[in-house]
């Protein structure tokens, strides 16, 4: 009889040698797999660790261990581990498990583990509430969560009803690493997928169509901790006998945006990107952003504030392209983030090797044909 560790090793070999499961095999290879007797079943974390109970794995067949490993890495692939559940955590975990298990059953990966939240024909029946949740394959995790009844019954009986999801809010490095892992997994896959979710995931890696404005907003959001609190009432409406929570600003967040005016980027695109960043400043008081404009050298420097007028920008330039002046500023001031708008046909990679960029996170916005800089940060394109 195989030991739990030997079962996991055998499952990894089965994933790697089966052309239908190379996607999952690649992702499993990027994870640390750790035995943990305190874990009731198994679990996955945003830090790319899979933990398992040796007692739990000992009861599984090799094919069920294949299902288990694929289940855990699929939580990572679908970015479930980068969502800290809000509201009912149990319902959030059930929604994630229903989504993952529905995909694995559709794809025919391994043998399902009885006692979990296992959809049948893309549906799941909650016996206690006599409620049937349908069309799981057509719904997002958030939509599934909203349809799960309150106080949901536990799945099955005995050990193994649900795994553990250790989540966190993703930073730029997490998202960059996730993108690299997904690209590697998709390239390793030798056939298409049956489930619509994995098909869309496959297409998004090969043909990313996420609007650059969405990427920009997602990039900046983790730096901002502005919030509202009842501990500080809104004084503006007290005279009207209204009680509303007050606005609490986070510490100042310093960033820069550099605009390439060498001639490869149109003035309209430059204006669109700077306008979008200005909109973020108007929404969040904690942002302090320096605008650097130039081609081979710095031509203009502006502080983006709520009162900033785009008409103040002259868009001087037209010569060659160098990002040396941008990295001079980064090395000297160590901003928390940098947004670089350019076709990247410059010395930018040389600058990464020459300059100390400290803890600065990077977002690159390019036009069609721009050099892909995703090795160094997030990348978005203007169509």
Image (cartoon, rainbow, N blue to C red):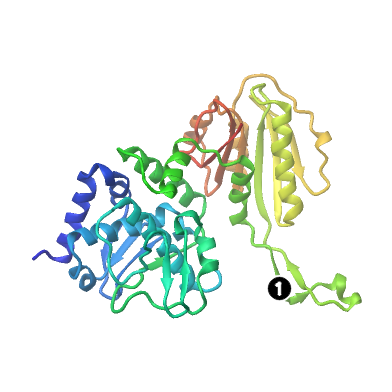
Quadrant in the picture for residue 42: bottom left
Secondary structure type for disc 1: strand
- Horizontal arrangement in the rendering, residue 28 relative to residue 237 (left or right): left
Q: Position of residue 337 (x, y in %)?
A: 60, 47
Q: Residue at x 49, y 54 (%)?
A: 138
Q: Residue at x 46, y 44 (%)?
A: 200
Above or below — where is 94 with respect to 269?
below
- Horizontal arrangement in the rendering, residue 195 relative to residue 267 (left or right): left
Look at mark 1 in the image and give the residue it sits on. 229
Quadrant in the picture for residue 161: bottom left
Residue 302 appears in the figure? yes
Q: Position of residue 154 (x, y in %)?
A: 39, 77
Residue lying furthest left: 1
Image quarter of the C terminus: top right
- Horizontal arrangement in the rendering, residue 213 relative to residue 129 (left or right): right
Q: Nearer the viewer, residue 150 or 312?
A: 150
- Horizontal arrangement in the rendering, residue 232 relative to residue 49 (left or right): right
How many numbered marks appear?
A: 1
Residue 85 appears in the figure? no
Q: Residue at x 61, y 40 (%)?
A: 212
Above or below — where is 276 with respect to 51?
above
Q: Mark 1, residues whose alpha carbon is within 10 Å: few (<14), some, or many (≥20)?
A: few
Q: Nearer the viewer, residue 55 or 245?
A: 55
Q: Position of residue 50 (x, y in %)?
A: 32, 61
Above or below — where is 271 with respect to 256?
above
Q: Position of residue 46 (x, y in %)?
A: 42, 59
Above or below — where is 363 with respect to 169?
above
């Amino acid at each position: 009889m195989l030991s739990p560790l030997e079962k996991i090793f055998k499952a990894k070999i089965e994933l790697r040698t089966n052309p239908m499961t190379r996607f999952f095999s690649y992702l499993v290879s990027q994870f640390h797999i750790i035995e943990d007797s305190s874990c009731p079943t198994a679990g996955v974390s945003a830090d790319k660790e899979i933990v398992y109970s040796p007692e739990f794995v000992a009861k599984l067949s090799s094919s069920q261990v294949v299902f288990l490993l694929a289940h855990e890495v699929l939580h990572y692939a679908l970015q479930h581990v980068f969502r800290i559940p809000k509201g009912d955590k149990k319902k959030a975990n059930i929604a994630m498990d229903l989504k993952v298990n529905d995909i694995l059953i559709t794809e025919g990966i391994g043998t399902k583990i009885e006692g979990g939240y296992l959809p049948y024909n893309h549906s799941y029946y909650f016996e206690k509430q006599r409620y049937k949740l349908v069309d799981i394959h057509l719904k997002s995790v958030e939509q599934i969560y909203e349809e799960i009844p309150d106080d949901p019954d536990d799945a099955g009986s005995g050990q193994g009803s649900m795994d553990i999801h250790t989540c966190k809010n993703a930073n730029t490095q997490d998202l960059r690493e996730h993108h690299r892992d997904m690209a590697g997994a998709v390239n390793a896959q030798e056939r298409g997928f049956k489930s619509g979710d994995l098909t869309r995931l496959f297409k998004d890696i090969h043909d990313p169509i996420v609007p650059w404005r969405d990427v920009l907003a997602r990039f900046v959001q983790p730096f901002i901790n502005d919030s509202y609190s009842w501990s500080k009432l809104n004084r503006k409406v007290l005279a009207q006998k209204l009680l509303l929570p007050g606005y609490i600003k986070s510490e100042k967040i310093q960033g820069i945006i550099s605009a390439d005016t060498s001639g490869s980027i149109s003035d309209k695109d430059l204006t669109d990107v700077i306008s979008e960043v200005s909109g973020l400043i108007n929404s969040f008081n904690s942002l302090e952003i320096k605008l650097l404009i130039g081609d081979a050298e710095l031509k203009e420097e502006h502080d983006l504030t709520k009162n900033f007028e785009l008409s103040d920008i002259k868009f001087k330039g037209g010569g060659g392209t160098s990002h040396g002046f941008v990295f001079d500023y980064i090395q000297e001031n160590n901003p928390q983030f940098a947004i670089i708008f350019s076709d990247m046909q410059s010395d930018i990679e040389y600058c990464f090797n020459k300059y100390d960029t400290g803890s600065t996170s990077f977002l690159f916005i390019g036009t069609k044909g721009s050099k892909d800089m995703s090795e160094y940060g997030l990348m978005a394109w203007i169509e």
